[in-house]
Image (spheres, rainbow, N blue to C red):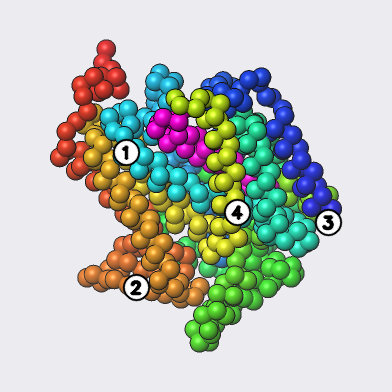
Amino acid sequence: MTQALIVFAYLAIVVYIGVFAFRKKGESHDAEGYFLAGRSLGPVVFLLSLFGTNMTAFAILGSSGHAFQNGIVTYGLMASSSGLVIPLTIFLVGTRVWALGKRHGFMTPVQLFRDRWECNHIGTLIFALQAVLLVPYIIIGVMGGGTTLAAVSGGWVPFWLGGLVVALVVMSYVFFGGMRGTAWVNTFQTVLFLVFGAVAVTVIAAGMGGFRAAAEAMLGSPATAPLLTRERISPWYFYPLCIAAIWLPCVFLGVMANRATDIPEIKAKLDARRALVAPTATALPVEEQDKLREQAAGDDVLLRLLDKHAPIWLAGLLGAGIMAAVMASDSQILALSTMFTEDVFAHYGGKARFGEAVQVQTGRVFVVLLTAFAYVIALNAPESIFELAIQYAFSGFAALSPLLIAALFWRGSTKWGALAATLWVAIAVIAVAAFQQVVPAPLPGRPPIVVWSLGGLDVLARTAGGTTVLKFMPVVPMTIVSALLMIVGSLLSAKPSPATIRRYFQTA
């Protein structure tokens, strides 16, 4: 109970910072002030806010839960590539987008696409797809908040109430504070998480007798030794590129949680996993298999370790640090609100007819509706935090990346190439979701269910963790096909006017 009270006190501080602190007079009624903080965030706040936005429930709870089930390979699945892709993207793409946005007054990617390719309704279609792909990130923020509060309170705060509290807190400071409030909250949360994250690893390591001893014990057991190797994941599924330090503690703690059999909640998860891999598991009713999967899920193992190995007051503070990470959905909510008011409301005449103040109020109403929608979905989401982000949100946005690259760096790109790529991504994401609904996942440790093979190669398969295409995660073929469609569609269609090309590719 003490831990929960500390977390609630932290949430009150967050609301104060987001709603009241660092506000500028008149900014809440001005569209650029509310949605972009007047383009005046300093480099330190911008950096910490950007960093905090990436530290979501997916990176903290989702990664540790996935590592609990699958082992150290979780680090290579996402963290290794993110450590290279994200900085390079910001440096090569982000800086150019910022410069163009400042030069032409853009506030959203769709505004850039509409101007660059001289399109109208195609831009609306791109907005709709981007909006759908942002929603899973908002959902996992609510799920992470609910999981955290339920764990730190010992069940006193149920998942539904914890998710509701987090949703209301995030909604309040995004509603009143806009970009400036959100940026300062993310700055505060990033500092908090970095400090408490280091403490958490130290405390849990000491409580478990040292990670070396825990790892050696796991290697000595046939049941847990595979978790310290790549045995659980196909090499086609595993593509490390570099080190992303922020994931390492969460992944490693998730793996080490397999040794925490003295924690009843974790022991129950391990018992459920053993029941799933037992030879008799396939004879169980589907409902019983689903129940065991839910019991074996590991999204809260990091919190269970904290509860066991840290003093109550410290566990509460560390729980607040984790809460700081899982509440990063605020940026996604604000981004989607900005996109709606600029790409739909203002674009189709709402701003010109009703004024800028009404545009801001429309954005706030959208924040409320979006948060409520995400909360309802979060209560019924069948996937884990990790799988929900990987299979849909991450895959979809990665597959849309050829649009931005083409718009910024290829003179010959056209709106018809963009339309072809957008339609493909929409169809592919829907297909993955439908496939996973129709084809049930195999039990953990069992071979994938191969739906289509060709020449001895598994073309399409359902695994315990999702879907594979040619043994790759769906994001790989989705992105490749998206890029090809962008190229072919552009080569076969008329280019934008020379004046537009000159504005984007000025020569000395």
Q: Is residue 90 visible?
A: no
Q: Position of residue 29 (x, y in %)?
A: 59, 24
Amino acid found under the numbered disc labelled 4: Tyr
**Vertical placement of 447 versus 474: above or below?**
below
Residue farthest front in this picture: 353
Residue farthest left in this picture: 492
User: Between disc 1 and disc 4, whose residue precedes?
Assistant: 1
| Magenta-colored stretch includes residue 171 | no
Question: Label 4 neighbourhood size at 10 Å, few (<14), some (14-19), many (20+)?
Answer: many
User: Between disc 2 and disc 4, whose residue precedes?
Assistant: 4
Q: CA distance from mark 1 to mark 3?
A: 53 Å
Instruction: State the SS at label 2.
Output: strand
Q: CA distance from mark 4 to mark 3?
A: 24 Å
Which numbered disc covers residue 1?
3
Residue farthest top in this picture: 508
Q: Position of residue 444 (x, y in %)?
A: 50, 73
User: Between disc 4 and disc 3, whose residue precedes?
Assistant: 3
In this rendering, which labeled residue sits more in front, label 2 or label 4? 4
The structure residue drawn at horizontal position 38% and vertical position 58%, both measured from the top left corner, is 430
Q: Position of residue 136 (x, y in %)?
A: 51, 52
In this rendering, which labeled residue sits more in front, label 1 or label 3? 1
Amino acid found under the numbered disc labelled 3: Met
Q: Which residues are magenta?
A: 322-351
Question: Label 3 neighbourhood size at 10 Å, few (<14), some (14-19), many (20+)?
Answer: some
User: Between disc 1 and disc 3, whose residue precedes?
Assistant: 3
Q: Is residue 502 visible?
A: yes
Which residue carries the number 1 mark?
A: 121
Which numbered disc covers residue 375?
4
Magenta span main SS: helix
